[in-house]
Amino acid sequence: MPERLLLTGNHAAAYGAMLSRAEVISAYPITPQTMIVELLSELTASGKLDATFITVESEHSAMAACVGASAAGSRTYTATSGQGLALMHEMLHWAVGARLPVVLTNVSRAMAPGWSIWSDQTDILSQRDIGWMMLFAESVQEAQDFVIWSYKVAEQVYLPAMVGMDAFILSHTAEPLIVHDQSAVDAYLPKFQPIYDLDPAEPRAYGGLVNRDHYFELRYKIFEAMERAGRLLVEAGEEFGETLGRRYTPLEEYLLDDADYVIVSAGALTSNVRQAVREARRNGIKVGLLRLVAFRPFPFAAMRRVLAGRKKVAVLDRNMGPGHSGIFAAEIRSAMYGMPDAPPIFGYVVGLGGRDVRVDTVADVLYDLITREEPELALFVGVKGLAIGPVRTHLEVRR
Amino acid sequence: MRWAIPELELMDTGTLGCQGCGGALSMRLVLKEVGDDAIAVVPACCWSIIDGPWPLHALKIPVFHTAFETAAVVAAGIKAAKVRQGRDTTVIAWAGDGGTFDIGLQALSGAAERNEDIIYVCYDNEAYMNTGIQRSSSTPLGTWTTTTPDENPEPHPKKDIMGILAAHRIPYAATATGAHPEDLARKVRTALAAKGGMRFLHILSTCPPGWKLPAEQSIEVMRRAVDSKVFPLFEVRDGRRYTITHWPERETTITEYMALQGRFAPVRHDPAVLARVQRDVDERWAWLVEQHERSLDTAAV
């Protein structure tokens, strides 16, 4: 029988790896992810999880160990955060090029300097163009389940996947968690049996020199696999519902049927958006929420279908791309391009470095969205000395 | 006692190694002893090229190519997976001096400290040869490279990588060269027998283009490296017990060692540099002999 526990997002992620029967785990401690590593160490030491835990000397080596173990045929897992993910960057590419379905939980944390361990998604979004699938968990339940969902798809397309979880807001917040029955998870996610596992009986070279006649094709196959992952995520999300009782989708629609205004968000701050939307609905405002669950592969078609014809769309970005805008806003604008009934996209940058994004904050954004005539690339919400203003206003204030 | 070299060949003749490549010879000799139940992990180094471009592959064992600084830890990951599959496959990290002394040192230290059950081989050609001869921390004092030009040859002595590995107290570490194949073969066998922990082989590997030496002198230069005590052949057990495995056969000066190599042209006739190199070599050798004798005494007790 499934068990109902009160756990933090971090511990739920570790349970996700355990239920997925990860075989080789390699990780390095970093706040606020460390609890994942600690619990996995305990689960491994106690025999509750039959895995080999390699305690490496850096995140770069953590991903390298996962790359080696995955190439040799093991299901592998790691977890990291912020600076650690940045240090892994080179090996994140290796996992993709070598076509290894490693799964990683990233507890999104602000990048230094200045030192900050608080919530900010710029770390994970900086890894956008590598070829990792990227899912954003909103709840403790999803912190666990998305690990399982990720393996299900990753091992079919031979691409790695990372699950994003917001620092503290989710990583250190306890919520009720349904720990699925192991046999049900086993039915959903059978043992990893890769096509190649460095078998000495078949002495091949993996990932070696490739000339201009072949590299391009290898890259195309990665692109193609990611497209396939888009379809498989939907299928595997539905199967998750059938087997494990919770159906997951790359995009979650909330109160959107008649909505003129849409707020788009990803990750744990979505819960406050949900609340703000409910309250606005009580005041007669036709607003809905669109939650970006899968960022890679990007759900283009569904996004276009959902947003077509809306009056205005606000995108909340707990991240930023200096010189452009919030990263989600940029992506969604691009997804709308060329659509005749494309809505104007208003980009709002919120909550960098763990600044609270409260229900009131979202209400402020909604008010601004409704009253503002022209969309701005990046409106900063809650920066001191700035109401809600575009970057240039901010600069004027400073002058 | 002389040891036979196995007839087994796990390296095809059609490699992309340069003529007289010490690194290709080192691989060929090591694999003869290791046998075919093995996997090699190759980070960025000459061997990324020597093995051949896809779909070619010069070795009859699987090779997993990896990023520059990750040979040791990728090998550890592979070993972990193979152990879980109940396989006794030997996993070899095969890195150059750049990937060992410099960029790979952190992962190597981590693997050594955890006493990973792998054989780490550094085939040392004393500079970044694959990228066109740039100095590494393995490049000896006085050497010309493209980043230590004639006007400013390498100002620092070679890093003591064996001392670093010994300080990790790993079960077995040894130096070798392809010009001393019986000694090399015995060390590979010793390393195989010491399975269960980290083993390190430091194999001097000549690079005719990088050392500016005629390809046919490759073996002779490695012999002179050993005979001049520039590169002594020894092994270290548990980081403590040192054994000199091959005593110099013929009196050879460092000048004679340097003579065949154009890379030493800037300093070959500089008495101050030669004196410093000779002093370093003598001190190191005296220290090694002392360790060797101390180990003998300990063994006797």
Image (cartoon, coloured by chain):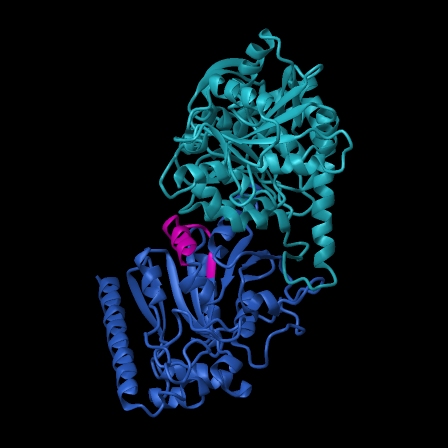
Chain colours: A cyan, B blue
Whole-percent x, y for residue A79 in the image: 48, 36
Residue A331 or residue A35, whichever sits in front: A331
Q: From this viewpoint, which residue is outermost toward the top? A: A282
Residue A367: image x %, image y %?
55, 19
Q: Is B273 within the magenta?
A: no
Residue A28 horizontal side relative to residue A15, left or right: left
- Left or right, residue A83 beside residue B57: left
Instruction: Indicate whether residue B117 is drawn in magenta.
Output: yes
Would residue A49 be seen by someone viewing this image from the given angle? no
Left-right relation of A276 to A213: left
Rendered position, B154 above or below A163: below
In the rendering, at what x and y percent does residue A279 appear? 55, 10
Most foreground residue, A361 or B212:
A361
Q: Kindly identify the residue that appears in the image at 66 percent across and 36 percent down.
A: A333
Q: Going 61% across and 70% down the picture, which residue do you hit? A: B50
**Quarter where residue A383 is shown:** top left
Q: Could you tell me residue B56's position as x and y percent?
A: 70, 65
The relative height of residue B69 versus residue A385 in the rendered view (above or below) is below
Above or below for A347 versus A62: above
Query: Across the whole image, how many numbered discs are drawn on residues?
Result: 0
Q: Residue furthest right?
A: A340
Residue range (magenta):
B105-120
**Is there any visible trace of residue A89 in the rendered image?**
yes
Q: Residue at x 49, y 85 (%)?
A: B212
